[in-house]
Amino acid sequence: MKLKHFTRQDAYRFKLIFENGEVKEADLKELIGNYVALESLNTAHLDTNWGCLEFKGGMVDIEPKTLYEYANRHEASTTNAIRCAT
């Protein structure tokens, strides 16, 4: 399940759009907080070939399947999963 697009909301909270059209909003602090400091979150980048979310020029990355499963378990309570019409 590749990541297709993301936007950083605030702090470690990201809006994630996956290849199946699902949109998730999740706080990634528990997943990457030990590896990516708050001031380094602006280095977030999407590797379009692999569908990975990367930080620090690729020194830290999250495999798409791991990110998808994490987002499903830790979705922000204010946002529900949405299927995008494509």
Image (cartoon, rainbow, N blue to C red):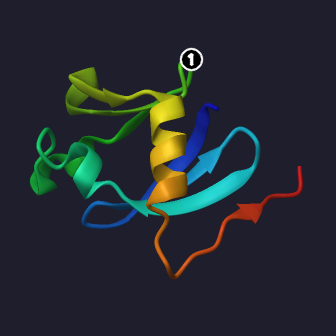
Image quadrant in which the N terminus is located = top right
Question: Which residue is at a point 24% across and 56% down the rendered structure image?
Answer: 29
Image vertical order of residue 78 relative to residue 10, above or below: below
* Any part of residue 15 in sight: no
Which residue sits furthest front? Answer: 73
Quick one: 57 or 84, which is closer to the camera? 84
Question: Which residue is at a point 64% across and 58% down the rendered structure image?
Answer: 23
Percent x, y for residue 47? 47, 25
Q: Disc 1 residue type? A: Asn
Horizontal side of residue 22 vs 36, given as left or right: right
Mark 1 lies on residue: 49
Percent x, y for residue 10? 31, 69
Image vertical order of residue 27 relative to residue 62, above or below: below
Image vertical order of residue 1 relative to residue 37, above or below: above
* Any part of residue 24 in sight: yes
Question: Which residue is at a point 24% across and 53% down the rendered structure image?
Answer: 30
Quarter of the image for residue 45 reads: top left
Question: Which residue is at a point 80% across and 58% down the rendered structure image?
Answer: 84
